[in-house]
């Protein structure tokens, strides 16, 4: 099938590459000239495990093309995916301007029947808006389908190639058949393609992300309670996770969720609810808890240093909002940096992939270490903000020898408390007693 993907960011590039991998001819369109030039020249623009190999193969075999020209990009396509940004607007609702601008342009460009697919995360009713925007100028038949994307950054290729489910919102038989054929290779193991109406598909994506964010904030509150009551959140997590109705996954407490999706999607659903005259109280609390959780370690750090961080120097491991990605959008590490610098401290940071993105964003507000151990030099304590695998079994002798004080503040519960006690570290984590 000939496919076009408009918007070649995290979702667009993974979508385009994975569809090419199953034999489709894919053209990716982006307005970012630099990005298109790099991709055309075989240079990948995001870090995503496993993507580069697929990208190179499909580019070489001529199934993957890049252009900045929408008209040229969509000319022969049967299906056009919109993988465009939907950032939060000033009031927290999803900003649809990127999508509607492209929809406006598409109307005049369509020369034969095409399926236009909303892959971006968009509020209920967007498929209708996109349809109306295209219809203003269109002289041919077309369908607008909602096909939300559930991939996770860090395992995006795996998620796309073997999705738990594919959700397709359409009431058109013609579009349903085309979308079913396109996704058939991805669900060969029997995972479902769930067909539904457009509005339900749109809401499914927000409901999924909001539910996951709720799980995180819930566990973070349980962790707070554990500390107050002298319980251990690891035990409680295992105790509840073994109940099938609850499940083991997504029960790890930490310093809050970040990234480009959960914060904005929860906020957008709250906003949609308000517009529908409904007060979604659980989600208000989820957001509130998460805001506070990002700085959960701060009082612990302050207490350790006698409430005076002026002149203190910290090593910070982990900048990305989660491991295996270079995405730093809404990353808790950035909030910690702000708070430390605001309190008069200096920070030396290390992240396996995300440092250059942070450097572009905040420049020399911090220093960038070449390695996790180099970050420790002259540091009074180590703070951990992202659970990258390379941080899980570090050389504790080296850490103890380099740090001015053997103190670790771990926002991701990477180490066992008794072991840290044995090693002689002052060790604070989330929802467990401290090693002192
Ligand atoms: P992104 O910012 O990484 O990529 C968007 C791309 O669109 C950019 O390359 C940008 O240059 C391009 N663009 C902007 N205007 C354009 C235009 N007029 N024509 C062509 N290209 C244009 O965003 P993303 O993370 O890929 O997210 C896209 C959508 O997918 C969002 O709605 C997001 O909520 C949703 N989503 C994201 C993820 C994720 O993990 N990142 C997962 C599921 C769903």
Image (spheres, rainbow, N blue to C red):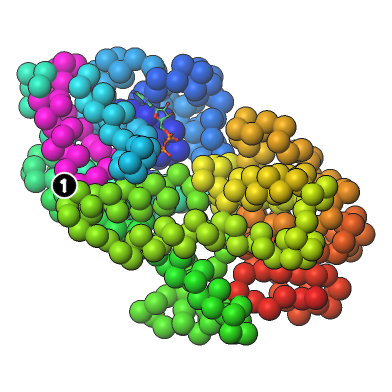
Element on which disc 1 rests: helix
Q: Is residue 322 above or below residue 362?
A: below
Q: Is residue 307 visible?
A: yes
Quadrant of the rendered image containing residue 101: top left
On screen, residue 345 versus residue 158, left or right, reads right
Residue visible at 69% across and 57% down?
384
User: Which image quarter has ligand 1?
Assistant: top left
Chain part drawn in magenta: 106-135
Does mark 1 have its CB less than 8 Å from ligand 1? no
Residue 116 placed where, x, y %? 20, 33
Camera-nearest residue between 6 and 282: 282
Q: Is residue 130 above or below residue 259?
A: above
Residue 132 painted magenta: yes
On screen, residue 176 versus residue 342, left or right, reads left
Q: Is residue 86 visible?
A: no
Q: Is residue 429 above or below residue 349?
A: below
On screen, residue 41 versus residue 117, left or right, reads right
Q: Quadrant of the N terminus?
A: top left
Quadrant of the rendered image containing residue 140: top left
On screen, residue 195 versus residue 212, left or right, reads left
Residue 348 placed where, x, y %? 77, 44
The residue under label 1 is 198
Q: Quadrant of the C terminus?
A: bottom right
Q: Is residue 332 above or below residue 125?
A: below
Residue 279 placed where, x, y %? 24, 60
Residue visible at 25% across and 38% down?
118
Residue 109 painted magenta: yes
Camera-nearest residue between 313 and 135: 313
Q: How many marks?
A: 1
Residue visible at 33% across and 65% down?
282
Q: Residue furthest right?
A: 401
């Amino acid at each position: 099938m000939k496919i076009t993907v408009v918007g070649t960011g995290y979702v667009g590039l993974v979508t385009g590459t994975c569809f090419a991998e199953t034999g489709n001819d894919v053209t990716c369109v982006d307005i970012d000239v630099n990005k298109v030039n790099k991709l055309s020249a075989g240079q990948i623009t995001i870090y995503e495990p496993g993507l580069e190999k697929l990208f190179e193969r499909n580019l070489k075999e001529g199934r993957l093309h890049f252009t900045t020209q929408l008209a040229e990009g969509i000319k022969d396509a049967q299906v056009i995916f919109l993988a465009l940004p939907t950032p939060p607007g000033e009031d927290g609702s999803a900003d649809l301007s990127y999508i509607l601008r492209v929809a406006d342009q598409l109307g005049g460009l369509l020369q034969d029947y095409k399926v236009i697919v909303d892959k971006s995360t968009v509020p209920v009713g967007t498929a209708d808006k996109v349809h109306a925007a295209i219809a203003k100028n269109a002289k041919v038949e077309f369908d607008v389908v909602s096909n939300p994307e559930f991939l996770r950054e860090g395992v995006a290729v795996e998620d796309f190639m073997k999705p738990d489910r594919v959700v397709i919102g359409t009431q058109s038989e013609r579009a349903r058949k085309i979308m079913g054929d396109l996704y058939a290779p991805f669900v060969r193991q029997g995972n479902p393609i769930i067909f539904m109406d457009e509005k339900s598909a749109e809401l499914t994506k927000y409901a999924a992300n909001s539910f996951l964010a709720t799980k995180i904030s819930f566990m973070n509150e349980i962790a707070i309670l554990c500390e107050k009551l002298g319980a251990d959140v690891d035990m409680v997590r295992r105790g509840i996770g073994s109940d099938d109705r609850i499940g083991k996954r997504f029960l790890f407490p930490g310093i809050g969720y970040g990234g480009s999706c959960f914060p904005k999607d929860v906020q957008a659903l709250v906003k949609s609810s308000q517009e529908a005259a409904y007060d979604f109280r659980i989600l208000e609390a989820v957001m509130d808890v998460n805001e506070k959780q990002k700085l959960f370690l701060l009082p612990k750090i302050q207490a350790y240093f006698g409430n005076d961080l002026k002149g203190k120097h910290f090593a910070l491991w982990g900048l990305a909002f989660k491991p295996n990605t270079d995405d730093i959008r809404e990353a808790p590490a950035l909030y910690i940096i702000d708070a430390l610098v605001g309190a008069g401290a200096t920070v030396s940071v290390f992240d396996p992939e995300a440092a250059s993105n942070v450097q572009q964003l905040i420049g020399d507000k911090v220093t960038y270490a070449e390695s996790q151990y180099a970050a420790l030099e002259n540091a009074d304590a180590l703070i951990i903000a992202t659970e990258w695998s390379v941080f899980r079994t570090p050389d504790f002798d080296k850490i103890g020898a380099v740090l001015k004080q053997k103190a670790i503040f771990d926002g991701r519960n990477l180490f066992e408390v008794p072991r840290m006690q044995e090693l002689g570290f002052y060790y604070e984590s989330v929802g467990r007693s401290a090693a002192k």
